[in-house]
């Protein structure tokens, strides 16, 4: 991926009429979900396998924001060991996190 695209990897492409993620959006999220911690890799990959095709653009943005967290913070959230930080405590982020915790 060219360096100018790396800086835009978190941006989502224009949305199709149905309001869901494009195939390119899903590929970008899958790439960003590749983490340094195996546990996060497995949990996020399983979530995307089960729910990725049905994610809305809003859910994709929420997932992107969750993926901005550190490895330890994300794992603690996924394992229900901590609450969402105040800056991420929004309805879309809570919904995506709940979906991720259920897989």
Image (cartoon, grey):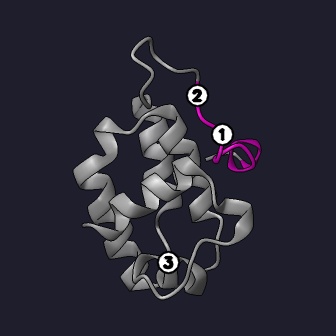
Mark with earlier residue (3, 1)? 1
Q: Nearer the viewer, residue 96 or 49?
A: 96
For disc 2, the marked residue is 13
From mark 3 to mark 1, how far is it between C-alphas? Answer: 23 Å
Disc assigned to residue 77: 3
Q: Nearer the viewer, residue 3 or 95?
A: 95
Which residue lies at the image location 22% right of the left edge and 52% below the top edge? 50
Q: Is residue 25 above or below residue 83?
A: above
Image coords of residue 67 (percent x, y): 57, 63
Which residue lies at the image location 71% right of the left edge and 43% below the top edge? 8
From mark 3 to mark 2, how far is it between C-alphas? Answer: 27 Å
Image coords of residue 13 (percent x, y): 58, 28
Stretch in magenta: 3-13
Q: Is residue 58 above or below residue 96?
A: above
The reply to whether the C-beta atoms of the residues labelled 3 and 2 are less than 8 Å apart is no
Image coords of residue 88 (percent x, y): 67, 61
Image coords of residue 2 (percent x, y): 68, 45
- Per the picture, the main secondary structure of the magenta-coloured stretch is loop
Q: Nearer the viewer, residue 35 or 51?
A: 51
| 6 sits left or right of 26 in the view | right
Q: Is residue 102 above or below residue 80?
A: above
In the rendered image, is residue 70 in sight? yes
| Quadrant hosting residue 54 | top left
The reply to whether the C-beta atoms of the residues labelled 3 and 1 are less than 8 Å apart is no
Residue reaching furthest top? 17
């Amino acid at each position: 991926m060219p360096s100018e695209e790396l800086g835009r990897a978190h941006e989502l492409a224009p949305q199709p009429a149905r309001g869901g993620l494009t195939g390119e959006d899903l590929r970008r999220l899958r790439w960003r979900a590749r983490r340094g911690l195996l546990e996060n890799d497995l949990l996020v990959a399983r979530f995307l396998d089960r729910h990725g095709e049905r994610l809305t653009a809003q859910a994709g943005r929420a997932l992107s924001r969750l993926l901005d967290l550190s490895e330890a913070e994300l794992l603690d959230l996924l394992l229900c060991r901590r609450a969402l930080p105040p800056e991420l405590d929004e309805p879309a982020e809570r919904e995506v996190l709940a979906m991720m915790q259920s897989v």
